[in-house]
Amino acid sequence: MAFDIHYEPPTEGKKETPLLKPGWYNFEVRDAFETDTEGNALTTIHGDPFIKLRVVEKSSETSLYYQLFFSEDGSKRINAFLYAVGTIAAPGSRVSILPSDFIGKSFRGKVDVSTYNGKQYNQIKMTSPLNAETPQVDEEAPREGVEPTEGIDEEGPSREEEDAPF
């Protein structure tokens, strides 16, 4: 049986993704990468390994990338993310991380707009469990007395190259 369609050739170049407004959003992890397209382990310019997660904002289907850096600077961010996606472990215990285990996990993320090489992009600055009390889009997060269930500030590595959106 033949199927008829209206053919539209793909557009040239990279599709522009609309920016999310700063605020809290619900995300789901859709992909997890520990290697590049050539099969090499992902590492920072300083040699630290990292995982790249493609996360999707649930209501708009906007995709963002979120990196977990396996370094001393990145440990706060990793612990906050593990907490946000419901990983349960005793404090101080050793946790094995398999990137593919994150696929399908959901969390709340505080999104901000950042600039890199003159181009604006969204960046997740904090993560929290879905059931946590967090402000809605365009609302400010509480500044004082924030409990771990309300959001964990997780500024990762401060090196600009490692905060890039790609």
Image: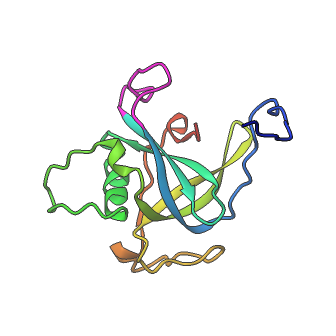
Asked if residue 37 can be seen in this view, the reply is yes
Instruction: Report the magenta stretch's main SS.
Output: loop
The one nearer the camera, 7 or 25, is 7
Which quadrant of the figure contains the C terminus? top right
Q: Position of residue 22 (x, y in %)?
A: 65, 65
Q: Does the magenta stretch include residue 36?
A: yes
Please tell me whether residue 47 belongs to the stretch shown in magenta.
yes
Q: What stretch is highlighted in magenta?
A: 33-49
- Residue 141 pos. (x, y %): 53, 75
Residue at the spot 82% in from the left edge and 33% down from the top edge: 11
Q: How is the image coloured?
A: rainbow
Reply above or below: 130 against 78: below
**Residue in the picture at 35% in, 42% down:** 99
Q: Could you say which quadrant of the image residue 45 lies in? A: top left
- The percent position of residue 68, horizontal first and vertical second, equals 40, 44
The N terminus is located in which quarter? top right
In the image, 131 versus 58, the foreground residue is 58
Residue 160, picture quadrant? top right
Residue 6 falls left or right of residue 41: right
- Answer whether residue 73 is visible to the viewer in this image: no
Examine the rendered structure and indicate whether residue 57 appears above or below residue 139. above
- Left or right: 160 as drawn, with respect to 145: right
Q: Count of labels shown?
A: 0
Vertical comparison of 127 with 8: above or below = below
Which residue of the protein is positioned furthest toward the front in this rendering?
1
Q: Position of residue 82 (x, y in %)?
A: 32, 57
